[in-house]
Amino acid sequence: MNADEWDEIRRLHRQGSPIKHIAVQLGMSRNTVRRALTLDHPPTDHRSRRGSVADPVDSAIRELIADDPGIAIAEIARRIQWAKSRTTLARRVTSIRAERSTGEPHDSPADTVPAAPSVPVYGSSFVGRRTELLELRKLLGDHRLVTITGPGGMGKTRFAIHAAGEYRRAFPDGVRVIELAALRSPDLLTQTVVDGLALANRDMHASPTENTIIEYLRTRRMLLILDNCEHLLDECAQLVSVLLRSTTELRIITTSREILSVPDEFVFPLSPLPTVNGTASASPARGTGSAVELFVNRAAAVLSKFELTEDNRDAVMRVCDRLDGLPLAIELACARLPVLSVYELADRLDHRLNLLTTGNRTGPQRHRSLQATMDWSYELCTREQQLLWSRASVFAGGFDLGMAEEVCSDDDVPADTVLDGISALVGKSILHREEGGTHVRFRMLESIREYGNSKLTAAEMDTLTLRHLRWCTRLVTTTADSWFSADQRAGSEKLRRNHANIRSALHAALLDSSDDDEVRMAADMVSRAWFLWSCGFSVREHRMWLNRILERETAPTATRGRMLVNLGLVQTLQGDRESADSALIEANAVNLTAADAITGAFTADVMGLKAFFAGDFEEAERRLTAALEMYEEIPDREDLAHTLRVHLGMLYCFTDETARATELFETVNERALAVGESWLRSYAVYGLGLVALMNEEFEDALRLGSESLRLRRDFDDVVGTTLVTDLLGWAEAEAGSAERSAVLLGAASSMWESFGMQLYGSSHWVEQRARFEKQARKSLGNDQFEKCHTGGAAMSVSEITGFVLGESVPSGDPAPGGGTRPEDLLSPREQEVATHVAAGMTNKEIAAKLVLSPRTVEGHVEHILEKLGMSRRHEIAAALAHAGRGTPS
C-alpha cells in the first residue's frame, strides 16, 4: 500500500463505502484496507526495498505467466533473477495464477497492482473474451482507429474499458476514457473531451475547437476511448477524423452501435459470448462457453450458493442460448433467480422470446432478443415499478432517492412508495446502486434508460422534463443562496454529482423547448451561482450557457443584468477583457432599468478586477472600494463582499501596501473560519501567501500556498488551483528548490491554458512570474528546467495537488523478463518480438506494433539475447534465418 492508495481508501471510507467494496474496487485485500484505516498518516512505501509484490517484479511475473502459463517457479526465479525467499515468490505466483483462473483479484495479504488512473473500475469481475482482447491488441498495432460495434447490451463499454486496463503500459502518455452516454448536446462534444483531458483553449471568444485537442495530442502516444458515440455519430466522426489527420502516435477506440464511416476506421464487431454445448467435465463450468461462465458468475452474486452442476447444466445453457449470449440479457435473467429456479427461468424465457421475436422486424436478431428481454423484465414489474422505471429515465448521470421522490412521484406513484419501488428496481437489475458521497445514488445502463424513455408519451415527457428542470434550478439556486456557510462543501459536491443532470436540464430548456418560463428558469440557474465554474462546470462551459441564454432572454430585467455581469467575470478570468467590456457596459445599462443593488455592486467589483488585471491600479482601487461600500449595504451577500476583499487585497500586494492587503485577507479568513466556509477561505489563505512572498518570507509563502491548495481540493476550481500553483512555483524558486519550481511552473502554464490566458493576460503578473522562472532556469540550466517544466505540464490537477502536499508516488513501467531459443525455448511473445527485431524494427516500432510499452519490449529483447547467448540485435536475424523463420508480413 502506497500513499495514493492510502488516500483513496480513506476517501472511499469517508463516503460510506464498506471495507469489502473498497477492497474489490481498488484490487487489494480487506486486511490491507483495514490496516490503512488504522493509520493516521500515509505509510512510507518500502516495497521497492523489500521486494513487495507490487514492484516491477510483479509485472515481470505476470508477463512470464501470460506467455507460458505452465512455467515452473524455479524458471521464473531464474529469469527475473529472484534473490529473496523462494516461499515468498511461490506464494505470489500461486496468487497470480488463481487471479487469472477466476478473473477476480486473489485475496492475499499482498497488495495487487492498482487500476490505471482515468480507467473506470467495476465491482464485478470481467468474464471471457480473451480471444477478442488478443485480437484487439493486434488491431491497435496496425490501425490507429478501431470502432467496437454491436447492439445495446453487448458489453462494448465493459470490453473497451477492460482492454484499456490491460494495454495501459503500452501508452506512456496515458489511457483516457471519455464517456458520452449522458451527453445530449452535440455542441458539447469538444467541450467534454477538452474538460476530460484538461486541454488548452486559447480562443477566448468561442467554444473550444478541435485545435485545442490537437495541440495537446499531436505527438503523444496515448490511447483515447470515446464510449457510446451512436447518438453523436456525425460529430464524433468529424472529431476522430481531425485527430487522426493531425496526430502521429494517438490510438483511438470508439464504441458505437453504428460505425463512424471515416477513413482508416477498422470495425470490430463484438459478438455475443459463445454458448458452446460442450460435454461435462470435472469442472462443469469449463468448456461450456463464456456465456455460461458469465451466468454462473452473476448467479452466484445473486444466490451465494449457486453453482453449475450436472443437473442444472442443460437449463443454464438453454437460458444462455435463448438469450444469444448477450451479457446484459444474461445479467437481467440472473436477477430473476431469487424468485425462479433456473429450470423455471429457462421455461418462462423460452415462452416469452417465442412471443416477442417479431416485435421489431427491422432490427437485427440479437437486438430483438435484447428487446424481448427488456419487455419481459418490464412486464414482471408492477405498474408502479414500470412507471418509476420510465420516469427515472429523465435523469442523466444518476440520481438519488430524494430526486426520484421529487421528480417522479404523483398520484399514480406516491412519494412514500418510491423507496420500495427503487428497491425493487435495484433487485431486478434495472437500477445499479452506486456510492455517491454521503448518499446512495442509482444509475441505469443506457439501453435500459432508453427502453424506459420509450414508454413515455410526449405529454408525460414534457411534464417530467419540466419537473427535472425545476429540481435542477432549485438545487443550483439553493446552493448559491447558502454558499458562504458550513453547507458549502455539501452543496458543491451535490452540484458536481449532478453536472450531467444540470446540463440535460439546460439543454432541454434552451434547445428542446420554446417555453419562456423554462428559459427563465435556466437563466436563473446560471446567473444565481456566479461560482458555477468551480463546481463541476468549466469556465468555458459556464460562458457558453450564459451566452446561449442571453441570446434567448433579451428583456432588460434584473436576471439579464446578473447574467451579463457573470459573463463579464468569466471573460475577465479568461483574460478576454475586450469581451468583458461589452458585457459589463450592457450590465450597467440594464441595471439602470432594473435597479438591482446586488448587480450594481457586482458590476463595479468585476470592473475593478478587470482594471487591476489591465494594470490600471488607480481605476481598480476606485471601483473596488466603491463596490465594497455598496456591498456593506447588502448584508445577505457576504460571499460577494468577501470575494471583493480578496480582489482588493491582491491589488494592494502589487502596490506595495501589504499591511492593508493582510488586513483584508485576515478579515475573510477569520469570518470563513467562523462560519465553516472553505472555498473563499482558500483564496484568503492564498492571499496571505502572496503577502509573504512579496515580503520575501518564502517558507511562509510555501506553507500558506500548500494550505490553500489543501482547502480547495474538494472543489473543481481550476482557476484558483492554477493561481496557487503559480505562487508555489515562485516561492520554491526563491526557497532554493529549483526543480520543484520548474515542475510547478510547468503545471501552472498548462492549467492556465486549459481555460484562458496565462495569469489572466495581466502583464504585471506575467512580469513577476518571468522573474522567478528566470531564477529557476538559471539554477537548473535550460535542459533540466525544460525537462522538469514538461513533466509538470503533463500532470493532472489531482497529481499536482498530491505533488505539493507530498502525496504523489513516482510512476514508471516495470521491465519484465523473458526466454531462451528461437523454435524451442522462446515464449510465444518472445518469438513474436524476435521476428520483428529480425525485420529491423526498433523497440519503439515493435511496441507500437504489438501494443506494448517500449520498456516491456526492451525487457523481451534483453532476455532473447541472453537466452540465445548473443550480444547484438543483428544476431537474432541470423538465428531466425538459420531456424527457417521468416520476417513478419
Image (spheres, grey):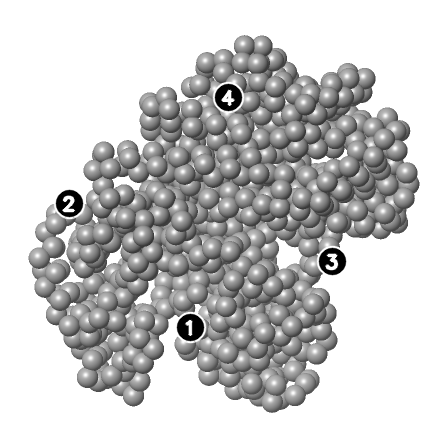
- The local secondary structure at tag 3 comes to loop
Residue 298 position (above or below residue 435): below
Q: Is residue 148 visible?
A: no
- The local secondary structure at tag 2 comes to loop
Answer whether labels 2 and 4 touch (C-beta < 8 Å).
Answer: no
- Disc 1 crowd rating (10 Å Cα; few below 14, some 14-19, many 20+) is some
N-terminal-most mark, 1 or 4: 1
- The local secondary structure at tag 1 comes to loop
Residue 74 position (above or below residue 20): below
Q: Residue at x 56, y 35 (%)?
A: 481
Q: Nearer the viewer, mark 1 or mark 4?
A: 4
- Disc 4 crowd rating (10 Å Cα; few below 14, some 14-19, many 20+) is many
Q: Nearer the viewer, mark 3 or mark 2?
A: 3
N-terminal-most mark, 3 or 1: 1
Disc 1 versus disc 4: distance between alpha carbons? Answer: 56 Å
Residue at numbered disc 4: 559
Disc 3 versus disc 4: distance between alpha carbons? Answer: 45 Å
For the C terminus, which image quadrant? bottom left
Residue at numbered disc 1: 103
The x, y position of residue 278, in whole percent, is: 22, 78
Residue at numbered disc 2: 362
